[in-house]
Amino acid sequence: MDATFGQLIRAELDCRRVTVRATVRSVNRITAGGVKTIYLQLLMDGGNIEASILDADAGDVSGLLDSEIQLTGAAAGKFDSKNQLTGILLEVPSIRSLKILSGPRTPPDSLPVTPMDEVLKTYDIQDRTKRVRVEGVITYYHAGMALVLQNGSKSMWISTLFEKPLETGQWASVTGFPDVRNGTLTLTRAAIHATGVRAPVAPSATSSKELASGAHAFDLVSVEGRLLMAVREAVQDEYVLVADGHLFSAVYRHPEPGLNTQPDPMAQFPLGSLVRITGICALDNGYKFQGPMAFELLLRSSRDLAIVAPPSLLSVRNLVFLVGLLLFVILTLGTRALLIERRVRRQVGLLAKFEQRRSRILEQINGSHSLTGILEEITRLVSFKLNGAPCWCTTADGGRYGVSPSDLSGMRRIESDIPARSGASLGSISCAFAQAAKPAPAETKTLAQAAELATLAIETRRLYSDLTHRSEFDLLTDAHNRFSFEKRLDATIENCSARAGCCGLIYIDLDGFKQINDLYGHRVGDLYLQKVALRMQRQIRPADTFARLGGDEFAVLVSTARTEDEVREIGRRLSDCFKEPFEVDRNIFIGAASFGVSFYPVDGQTKDALFNAADSRMYVSKRARKDHPALQNTAM
């Protein structure tokens, strides 16, 4: 039966055989599990739909672009992580079910070239979407930008320019236009009517694993995590937390500047505290069946954070308190024992110096001092406490710090493990004494205290190094990220300008990567990106910089280029590395990429100029190859 877009989007013909008339907006040939599929994006009168045609013997289908067709197949829906309809998919059994009613007015290959800054002049859309009304409790509100409504198990993100004060927890009626953004249902251009009726929603207690499943998209939730970092930025406060091995952020967005509203003061919790966070779960991508999703929690105010448990008792403040308490006890005993006053004072002085040096070491651990210097200071602290006995520290990676006697024969040696909070030992700390010296309880105790300090120092530096690495390197491919790459590019341009040198920029865009994500999911897509990045990284020189700019875009900075041919030679090596197929999760992918090269100072003398030149040439290369299938795969 003939179907209209309205019938399809209202699911009136779900699972039924229907016939539609539409214009082909895009056509791609893909392979899934050994079955060849033609994937069409179609424009009907009323909206866009997608179609999947199973046909192993279909010929060239590139001529379908911009054609008006008649297509018959089974009507189905596309759904987000909360099983809400987000689109229409027509499943077609054979290419024989497709009939071309009229070809394109102008074949795509014959279209004139349009300057990039004039592309939008061809934009044209007719929007007949009707305004709808929804009701629910306001669980989140950012004046001038958005609010979130929740009604039972359903919740929705609503975009609006509404700026009047609204309180969370009250019932509201909202009208607007439905849309799908990033795989999630939304309401846009919304008008708000708050009823003033209070109907607070209790946050749903959950875990980070459950939030990553997408089941709580835009719900008001509550989760606990260990606080790793807190940063106040120009437009928001960000708290980085970890729970059950998942790293995620809780974000409080400051009020818009034009509203003249001051942001809440930032919540001040000691790092390492166990914190309960209440907020709205926002997903990076709401499409269903794509595995765990990245998420963040949107906070209504700083009051949405509450401390559950403080960090470890091993802190400078507690140590200072302990020193004060010991001094008080010693001084009290001193007043009652005048005969041993000098001895008590000497012991108190030594203990105070020991604790002061220990406190200084803790400050160094919390500061930016090097691990080498801290471990050296710990060994000196042990020698100080044990009357100058030589002390040294050996780490699991083979490092050696402190003073180690060249000949230990004839000496009594004691050793303490440096324990890790989880996993294998971090190393050991040792001390040597004359054979005649009698063992004392202070020896074992002092080494144990030193081992605790060493554990704290090593694990704190590892965490700091990991956070630093995350800020400069892409977590998926371990290549430099855009921030790190642009910083290096700026430095290289400045250096080349000072010494009249040259450098080159190679811009890389993978062809056909979206089809891998659509057919095999983000897990296979991520594995493919890792293999591509590793293979390309092996083609560049040690002095050059390889980076992932985002998605399927990469770049190489050739910082020591002498000629343009030298840069292009590296570009050819990068291109040649795609000649061999990629094996990913029992699939063979024949990869391809488009390259654009720019050269300093010929193509520009600024970072943006070099990026624009390389980007333009990359798109010229991509356009020249569009008649050639960019990516195919075959199941093993």
Image (tube, rainbow, N blue to C red):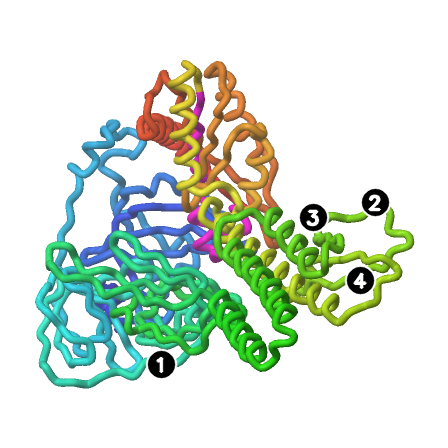
Tag on residue 401? 3
Q: Tell me what residue is drawn at x 17 percent, y 61 percent.
A: 262
Q: Mark 3 or mark 4: which comes first in sequence? A: 3
| Residue 623 percent location from the top left of the image | 36, 31
Dividing the image into 4 quarters, which one contains the N terminus? bottom left
Amino acid at circle 3: Tyr
Amino acid at circle 4: Ile
> Tag 2, which secondary structure?
loop
Amino acid at circle 1: Ser
Closer mark to the observer between disc 3 and disc 1: 3
- Region of the chain picked out in magenta, as a range: 503-529
Magenta span: predominant SS is helix
Q: How many marks?
A: 4
Q: Is residue 259 visible?
A: yes
The residue at which mark 1 appears reads as 204
| Residue 625 percent location from the top left of the image | 42, 31
Q: Tell me what residue is drawn at x 25 percent, y 39 percent.
A: 104
In the rendered structure, are the residues bearing label 3 and label 1 in contact, judged by CB atoms less than 8 Å apart? no
Q: Mark 2 or mark 1: which comes first in sequence? A: 1
Q: Is residue 516 magenta?
A: yes
Tag on residue 414? 4
In this rendering, would 525 be left or right of 258?
A: right
Closer mark to the observer between disc 2 and disc 3: 2
Tag on residue 406? 2
Amino acid at circle 2: Ser
